[in-house]
Image (tube, rainbow, N blue to C red):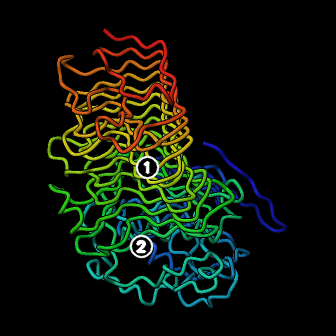
Amino acid sequence: MTETNETGPSHARHRRDFLRSGLPLAVGAVGAVLTEKGAACQASSATVPDSVPNLSALRQVPAPQKSLARHVMGYRTPGDGGGGVFVWDPKYSPDPLAPPDDGGTYILPQGAAPASVGRWRRQFTGALNAKWFGAMGDNSGSTPADTGVDIAMEAWNSDWPGWIAAQRAPQITRFTNNDSWDAIGIQMAMLSVGANHDQMVGGNSGEVYIPGGHYLLSRPLIYSGGMHTTLTGAGMYQTMLSKTPGRFKNSYIFTMTDTGGQPTTIRNLGLTGPPLQSFDELNDLNFMLAYLSHTNGVHIENCWLTSCNLGMLLAGTTDCFISGCTSEYCGITFDVGPGSDVHITNCNFWQSAARPARSIGIRSAGLVHCLGSRYVGFEGYSIQCTGGAVQLVGNEFSGFGLAQGVIEAAQAGQSVITGNRIIGGTVGAMVTLGNDTVVSGNYIEQRFEHACVDLSQGKSNINVSGNVVCVRPATTKIAEHSLIISMLPNVNYSGGCTLCLINGNTLNVSNAIGVDPAHNQIVNNLMP
């Protein structure tokens, strides 16, 4: 247990560590100490603070004349995770752009003027807990109307016009009695960090912690401007965020826009939709999980994306780092727009036997770096480039079906594909390359009657070197008559590649290279 002392002209303040769940480890302002079970261990000159059952009861306590503490037992009911210790701070005044009561960490007594100085301040260090602001996480989607609360008159439930304008977040509007407590609690915690980041631990930073549970959202979670929030769950399979059935069908669970400067982190969360069986159903539902637009310095770590049309859309997003994430049952896992620069490391993207047809791992018109990740079972492309470039190093691509190829990079230039393991069966070329591309040190195995690597359609400046390229079984007839191909005119291909180097590859069938030797260099390749 740690203690931080802050001295003022007439009184001393004490801050103590508390459990993330909101239950106190210590009570500082009057020197009392509580164990996790709530028993008092009283110092010689201290008294145990009075308890109140919930935050509503705390608001009924008149503003005291001096600093003292109250133990709040829960947000609504004792033990619901929203409790903690509050100390009266006669000098505290919130950000003038924010509401007078943030709903979870600083509380205005009922009847006090909004502009008055003095608040009940929650004692904590570290992250804000979403349950302090009303989130429930019990998969009920319960609303204020369900719990007999009218939030229209709550001091914290305003449109925050000044602060929202400053943060460029016009999508955030007044909560209604039909909004889920989960959406209210998580968003209010994020707003509180943003509005009061200078007073949070660590200066201009803050963290919102969402405990384990299944949270049903009635509206998107908005992250915009300078909110300075790190969003953390208990684990990708422990803290789950979903839409309330029938709510905001054509929008995202999570929206981040116009953020920059200090890096932002989203970690240890599961974003999930309803069970899906077909690609058509994906289109019908139009269910999307996350949208990042015009952002930079975003880190997405150890998250789970599942059961949706689109896992994540990155539009104009630079310096976006995605690591340790898992996806399944997504029509498109990541859609990377022009001007985006995305780094994907140690992720696991897959579909199962019940996968939607024509699913795609990454569709990109930007720059994608992918290191040490797995793409398993996609019926469409694992990587489909409509522009930009890719850098694929040390990844595994396996278990493909019938629909398309594995890596479609014909429209991408200046790409590097090295050290990957690419195994499966596709009805077209497994890897199709664009100009100015290096393909080296890969193991590529085709199990259908189609090419492994396609250099055709007038491409140039491609280096294919040091790869092991084969078909299984070796007697399989390759429809394009070769494994590494840019077919000669006598087999009716529209044109060959030029200025390409095919060097030092090991191939398990004879006559496996159908590239025009007059315009390219073909040396040191091993064939039967």
Label 1 element class: strand
Q: Is residue 25 visible?
A: no
Q: Which residue occupies 20% across, 31% down? A: 449
* Amino acid residing under circle 1: Cys
Q: Nearer the viewer, mark 2 or mark 1?
A: 1
- The quadrant of the image that shows the C terminus is top left
Front residue of 378 and 510:
510
> Is 209 situated left or right of 470 in this image?
right
Vertical placement of 82 versus 303: above or below? below
> Which residue has dot 1 on it?
385
Q: Is residue 421 visible?
A: yes
x then y, percent, for residue 143: 30, 76
Label 2 element class: helix
> Is 197 situated left or right of 372 in this image?
right
Q: CA distance from mark 2 to mark 1?
A: 39 Å
Pointer 2 or 1: first along the chain: 2
| The furthest residue to the right | 9
> Which residue has dot 2 on it?
184
x then y, percent, for residue 184: 41, 73
Q: Which residue occupies 32% across, 49% down? A: 360
Front residue of 21 and 72:
21
* Amino acid residing under circle 2: Ile
Q: Are marks 2 and 1 in contact (CB under 8 Å)?
A: no
Q: Which residue occupies 71% across, 50% down? A: 4
Front residue of 239 and 58:
239
Q: Which residue occupies 24% across, 43% down? A: 351
x then y, percent, for residue 292: 50, 62
